[in-house]
Image: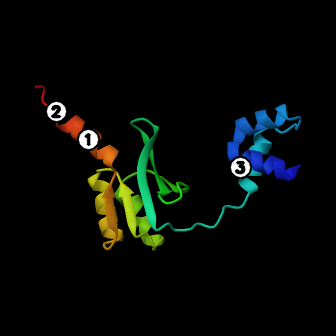
């Protein structure tokens, strides 16, 4: 039963796992679910050959974070508090081995990669670049 609880909280975390486990007849509260989750050892961090970098808002206009994705597998590698070049540069220097970095058109991330991994290939995300072109210089009618 312990493994079932661990598997559930690993996938769903706090409240959602507690609700599902209660529906399955296991009396587990949110606090117990979170304690169980925190007790699960983290998997060994494997530095991917191809790394995707993007930022996202935790609270729009106030708090941001940066997500790092293994572009070959689609798995999350890490989530860094904050955004910007410093956070990404520090992570890349502490985790050598990345050969290709996929990123948005941000000059901030481009500089971070150049500073930390001067030999890495940088690939700008086509979707981000297309959206930036539409916003910066929309097609002229006619």
- Measuring from the top left, give residue 63's x and y in whole percent: 44, 42
Residue 80, percent from left and from top: 49, 55
**Residue 132 marker:** 1
Dot 3, crowdedness within 10 Å: few (<14), some or many (≥20)?
some
Label 2: which residue?
A: 139
Name the quadrant containing residue 51.
bottom left
Residue 54 against residue 12 in the figure, above or below: below
Judge the density around disc 2: few (<14), some (14-19), many (≥20) Cα neighbours within 10 Å: few
Marks counted in the figure total 3
Q: Mark 2 or 1, which is nearer the eye?
A: 2
Q: Quarter of the image containing the C terminus?
A: top left
> Which residue shows up at 38% across the image and 65% down it?
100
Q: Earlier in the sequence, mark 2 or mark 1?
A: 1
Image side of residue 124 versus residue 42, left or right: left
Q: Position of residue 60 (x, y in %)?
A: 42, 35
The answer for how far apart the CA atoms under marks 1 and 3 are is 37 Å
Badges 2 and 3: C-beta atoms under 8 Å apart?
no
Residue furthest to the top: 142
Residue closest to the far left: 142
Earlier-in-chain disc, 1 versus 3 = 3
Instruction: Tell me whether the residue at label 2 lies in contact with that at label 1, contact meaning CB atoms closer than 8 angstroms.
Output: no
Residue at 44% over, 50% down = 82
SS at mark 2 in the image: loop
* Residue at mark 3: 10
Disc 1 secondary structure class? helix
Q: How far apart are marks 2 and 3 (CA)?
A: 46 Å
Whether label 1 touches label 3, CB < 8 Å: no
Decide which of 71, 38 is in the foreground and name it: 71
* Crowd around label 1: few <14 · some 14–19 · many ≥20 (10 Å): some
The circle on residue 69 is none
């Amino acid at each position: 039963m312990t493994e079932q609880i661990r598997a559930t909280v690993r996938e769903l975390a706090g409240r959602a796992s507690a609700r599902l486990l209660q529906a399955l007849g296991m009396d587990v509260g949110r606090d117990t679910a979170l304690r169980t989750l925190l007790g699960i050892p983290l998997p060994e961090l494997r530095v991917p050959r191809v790394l995707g970098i993007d930022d996202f808002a935790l609270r729009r206009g106030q708090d941001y974070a940066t997500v790092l994705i293994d572009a070959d597998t689609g798995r999350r590698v890490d989530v860094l508090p904050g955004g910007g070049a410093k956070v990404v540069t520090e992570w890349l220097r502490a985790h050598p081995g990345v050969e290709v970095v996929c990123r948005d058109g941000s000059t901030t991330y481009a500089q971070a990669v150049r500073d930390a991994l001067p030999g890495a290939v940088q690939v700008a995300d086509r979707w981000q670049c297309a959206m930036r072109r539409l916003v910066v210089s929309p097609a002229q009618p006619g």
